[in-house]
Image (tube, coloured by chain):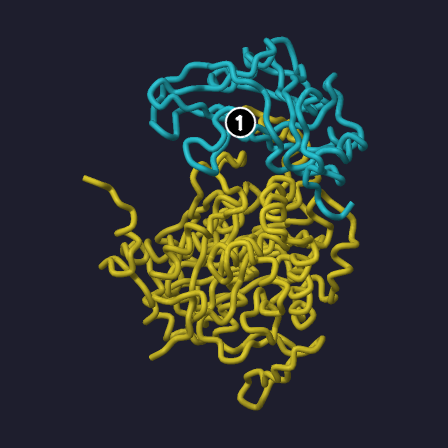
Chain colours: A yellow, B cyan
Amino acid sequence: MTLSSVSDVDASSPKHLRGRYAIAGVGETDYMRGSEYSTRSLATWAIKNAMDDAGLAPGDIDGMLSYSGNDSIFSPFVAGDLGIRLNFYMDVHGGGSSTEALIGIAIGVIEAGMCKTVAIFRSMNGYSQVRIGGTGARSAVPINGDQIHHRAYGWQSAGQMFAPTFLRHMYDYGTTPEQVAAVKVAHSKHASNNPKAYYKRRFTVEDVVSSRIICKPLHLLDCCVETDNATCIIVTRLDRARDCRQPPAVIQSVVGRCCKPRIDMHYQHGPISNVAGHYAKDILFPNAGVTPEDIDLTGSYDAFTFTTMLQLEDYGFCKKGEGGDYVSSGIIELGGKRPNNTSGGHLCEGYTHGMNMVIENTRQLRGEVDDSCPIGPDGKRQHTHDYGEGGCRQVKDVELTANLGWAMPGTGSAMIMSKDVR
Amino acid sequence: MPLQGEYMGMMLTVDDVDRENREFFAWCDKGEFRLQRSPESGLLRYPPTTACPWSTDRDYEWVPVEGKGAVHSYVEVHHPIQPAFRDKVPYMILLVDLDTQKGEPSEYEALRVAGNLVTADGEFAPPEAIKSVGIGTRVRMVFSKVADGFSLPQWTIDEDAEQPEAPWRYPQE
């Protein structure tokens, strides 16, 4: 007997749950530095905002999931603080790409009859406590066993670890620093229209490539911001989501922590400029029954400018090797054909390990992003679609979005969501 | 007793139960680069692991491997993260394709061995040496001592090898 994994992820499988689950509520804290809040306090703040967004009471939520790298609070504490009695919870180890993976787990536990509505949160003092860039206390911890093969060489932070992937892409395909700098340009343009973004200033390609080198091939402005914040997403079955306050963002397919062969960081399995999306795309698109061409909006994880580029390429939004052209063509900017990270993402809005990009796409699908456009008599924002500085960031007629989560070159998650069509 | 030593001010430890890493670093300290080979697949692997990814074979033997190869990719660090590297910047982390088993068992696979660019004496390479190294540069292995019975593999420019005319370097110098 051959154990083929393909049939299990095939869209024709009877297990398939396309279009049956939704994000019913989203919420976040302010994006801060020096927050003066515990991760427990930040978590309750974000979850409460998501509950208010969905119009759900504590008794409506009975499942909780969170992820962290031992830098956060556990679910039972925040559930108790908010008067939520849990039928299910799990706090998992993980950073980037956990968001979409936990959404998939939430669907599974609800489908298994273990609970009915799950709040997923990530709470972190990524600037004030455990710094995401790897400086501070994290930089000088003792080095044990397998870690010696990289950390003993001064190869430790995310930027240092991911850099050989992009450098080799430059070598193989002629991709330039200026091309990936366009990712920062686009995301900073988007953030300038996002009142809650930590950095709202617009940057140019010249600003990025003239900022100081952190580690070649990364400049300071190729790297994401470090912030203190919590974020929350509430997942439930579509029929329940339809009873909530906001229009549901319907989950069409999800991929969780899909891996390249041998994901250890030593890149034994080439080409090293291929990332996990090379494999994840074959689950993501068939299960949703759509192609990259159908997607109106992407949320490609921007730990660094080049992570956005490598993923868009390997998920098939352009041909392999043409990611540099794609991200510098204007396609990924507001007003372009397929904007990416319209909140400003990790490069500008704040660093959340991926959740803010799912929150943003949820709001885009509702047609209700929180920009500075005036609120009309019906209580809804009157979006102008003028993407000038300080203006609108709502994309016109969003039907389908894709989130592309990144843990590291070898591991990623993804999700396609749609508007609710009744 | 765990294998342990202070290296550049960093405490490096290999626990007693971590047999694969203990043996790897102990061979390095004898001046020999040895990798695990599965008797079943006949394939070498790096870094040390607990089974052969091509045959699931848990048995292995340590086979001497020539410490020579070419730079596949690299990182050139200018902003240090770890305190130990504060006075070392700029420094290079090389990812080197060994000549042995390159392109096996599939086209893009290789034994890609990490290390810093050092001088033949094992000192961190000066800026002028860094500027001469890029993708394609031929390098050979040297070892840096951590403690008795514990050394790390490192890379230095292979003076005897024929070097590419202009190894590929990051374009913004």
The quarter of the displayed image where residue A194 is located: bottom right
Residue B101 in percent (x, y) is at: 47, 26
Q: Is residue B128 left or right of residue A123?
A: right
Q: Which residue is mark 1?
A: A146
Badge 1 marks a residue whose secondary structure is: helix
User: Which residue occupies 51% across, 19% down?
Assistant: B21
User: Which residue occupies 71% across, 39% down?
Assistant: A136
Residue B56 in percent (x, y) is at: 34, 27
State the residue lying farthest toward the bottom.
A377
User: Which residue occupies 51% across, 78% down?
Assistant: A367
Residue B86 in percent (x, y) is at: 77, 33
Image quadrant containing the N terminus of chain A = top left
Determine whether A143 is above or below A364 in the image. above
Residue A226 appears in the rendering: no
Residue A352 in percent (x, y) is at: 58, 55
Determine whether A362 is above or below A127 in the image. below
Number of residue marks: 1
The quarter of the displayed image where residue A309 is located: bottom right
Q: Label 1 is placed on what type of residue?
A: Asp
